Amino acid sequence: MHTDAFELITLRISTWTYLIVLCLSMLIIVLFTCLNDQIHYGSVDDPSIADFEYLKEKYTKSTQCPCSEIAIPHYSFISLSPHFHPVCTSDFVSDLWFKSIADAGWPQHINKVEDVFISGHKYFKSLSSLCQLTKTTVLGALSIFNQSSLITDQTLSNAEFTAHTRHSFNQFVLNTAAEVKHSIALIQSQISITYTTGQSDAFWKLSSWRNHSHSMYFQAISKQFGNCSCALDDECKLSMILYNYTNYLDVNPLRPILNISNMFVGCFPIKAVFQSSLDCIFDQTCLNPLVNQMKNISEVARKLNISTLERNSTRFPPKTLIQEIINEIMIETWNEKIDYSKYYTYCAPKHCSYSYPSRNNAVYGFITMIGLFGGLSGTLRIIVPFLIHWIRNTKCARGQVNNMAARHRFLDLCRLVKKKAIELNVFESEVSWNDPHRRHREIISTRIYIFLLTFSVIILAIYTGISTRIQIVKVDSPSQSTFERLASDSKYSSSLDCPCKNISVPYSTFASISLRHHQVCSSDFVVHNSLWIKLIYCDSELIDYGYDDYRYFIIPHFRLLFFLCTLANDTFTNALSIFRSKTYISKQTEPFNIVNTQMRNALAQFQLSVPRTFLRRLDLIRDVAHGNGYVSRSSSNWYIEPVQTNNFGTMAPRSYGNKNCSCGINASCTSLATIDKWIVPGFLVGCYPLESLLQSTLECLYDLTCINRLKNITKFSNITFRPLDPTLSSHNVTVQSLVDVLMIDQWESNITYENYYAACSAPSCTYVIIEQVNLVYMITTIFGLYGGLTIAFKVIVPILMTIVQYLIMHRQQRIEPGVEVIPYRE
């Protein structure tokens, strides 16, 4: 057989073809493997700060180091030691200073409200109260801040940690400042809403004297500070003056020594303080005359040993308004110390994982080549010879003409295939060339080998074809569109895992709220110190109208409207600041529908809670005023019963509603508002201006005729005021109903999911795919196992054949021929 030249050439061609195809295939596999980028993964156990920072710098996006503690208290890594404005620790807010000023305020019958010895006591007392208020608020807020936590699932880098901590600290400062403003506003609300009077803003005058009954009637008259009346503006002010009381006689006028600039007296001490500055107590030329004059008058003051404040002891210039200092919570510096190493110690990551793309090295390519070599070589050893024989037999039919019929060529091919199949011997050796018995055994082994190999491949193909494959797919730095596509696909959503880099996202990042106040709050009727207020103001305090005449209530009503609008806006602003500082906590990146639902619920709760906070604050002030029986400035609820000859009088309650409702029993008593028998549409009068306003409607302000009548109650004016628009709001809604909704007509909120997704910043997403294997995977798997099976069966089958042959021979040797003797019978 092997002497046939045709067969020898065919074998040589097959061998060379086999070698060339095998080498080219191996070369392609090695090049593809080595040039293809692969994602490599690594990890570091118990990383130090240096290890973590190295990984974070080199593998910024892929480094993940889960914290052992995801909630780390602020006190563990940040230290705050606030230092307050030096005035708050100076002698200017001491009891000795207060007593010295009060003791110097003589003679008491001198009614010069601008005298520093008359009004200075209240001024510095208010300043001391503000210092105490800010200290108490700051220390309380600081205690809460220290107990709150920085929440993060992954270890933050130094830069990320600093940014998070700074944001939390800045938000803490803003919230604390808002709390201080809220407390101050509550104090001012108590003054403005109850519309009561005090020593600074009004005085009581004897309004009338009745000789026949020896009785008198008292009335509160608003004070004037220059051209500014406390009846119209709570922020009237006048510079304090230092007078010379030395050798003072009643017949001689007081001589001013010093006009103290930027130190004011006003309608209310706290409002005057806000408009003042502290430059006098920084200036020796201003403070020395004051102290010297005080020591000349007061024995208490001689114990003082006081000096000016140092200009370099504060970051605020001396002429800075106290209002601005209060806005900064009177803090010079927070002395914050932020320690990243302490944070890292508390976070305590147990391990860090990272990934990076790189090309496979030659070793990996070589290993891959070895793994595929067996299967590829075995396949080529079967396919290549068959193809070469077929091609050569087609071209050269060994002695037959080229135009042989196709049918004969096909039959010859079939006979050739059959002959090759019968004579196929994969275990052929030189020994068997001259040993037919051995050759026969090798052919049988070949058939067994082929049967086992075919059967195994069929089983593998069936198993691989019906089995499912679980594949974990990782997507690095997924875009929002990629995440939304995966989250919306039911095949992936259940196994989708996209951990947030920042598990705590402030609401301010992706949620916004805007609103539209009731139109009255932006109208000309409630603008501070507006032309409308000046036009409707009349010196009703100097005219003896009936106590229920609307001219006593008109100024309080419109000033209260302004105050309610301002108070509602401040309440909303403070609440919004706190709401924006809250955080949305989610370890996993949430899809839009979940974020939207949860934030809509949070916004709805916010819209409900803010008006309730406003109403509780307003009700507290009302209850305090009612419970303590505060007397209204216009004596609309209580009045002094005419003093009789025994020089004693009593406080008597007013009555409203045709005298059927007494303010001594019910503070909500009201009557229709009238001016000279004209009933003012919508408005009511009652015990307190606020109570009657809340029960009123703004019907008159929608009617130009009514507006003009109110405008002209004191003097005629051709100035036109635009009425409220009935298409924007209803005219018959009570002010109480407006207050119940925080004077807001419309809320608008917006959730920007794109901002949430960017803040969450998922470094990667993984999901599981469970699917039937495809044909390529099945072929690749069979090829990968084919080489191992061929080698295994080539080793096992000859051994099995040897064992079987040995057993057969051994059995034949044990069978001995038996001879039976048959007796012969004649």
Image (tube, rainbow, N blue to C red):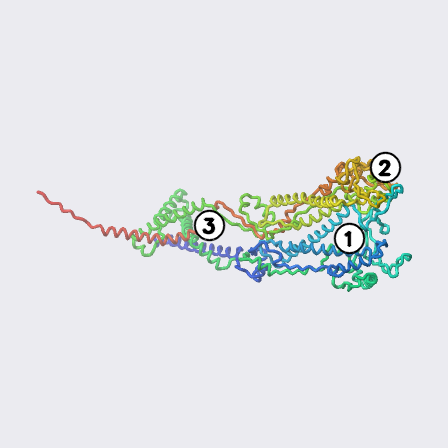
Where does residue 636 sit, x and y in percent of width and height? 80, 42
Q: Residues within 10 Å of mark 1 (few under 14, many from 20)?
A: many
Q: CA distance from mark 3 to mark 1?
A: 86 Å
Q: CA distance from mark 2 to mark 1?
A: 38 Å
Where does residue 31 sit, x and y in percent of width and height? 50, 56
* N-term-proximal mark, 3 vs 2: 2
Q: Amino acid at mark 1?
A: Ile
Q: What residue did someone put label 3 on?
A: 780
Vertical arrangement, residue 526 with respect to residue 798, above or below: above
Q: Amino acid at mark 2?
A: Asp
Tell me if 638 is positioned left or right of 65 in this view: right
Q: Residues within 10 Å of mark 2 (few under 14, many from 20)?
A: few
Q: Secondary structure at mark 2?
A: loop
Residue in the image at 50% along x and 55% along y: 33
* N-term-proximal mark, 2 vs 1: 1
Q: Nearer the viewer, residue 235 or 128?
A: 128
- Quick one: quadrant of the C terminus? top left
Where does residue 270 sit, x and y in percent of width and height? 77, 53
Q: Secondary structure at mark 1?
A: helix
Q: Which quarter of the picture shows residue 603?
A: top right
Tell me if 797 is positioned left or right of 654 in this view: left
Q: Nearer the viewer, residue 248 or 316?
A: 248
Q: Amino acid at mark 3?
A: Thr
* N-term-proximal mark, 3 vs 1: 1
Label drawn at residue 270: 1
Q: Nearer the viewer, residue 87 or 805?
A: 87
Q: What residue did someone put label 2 on?
A: 676
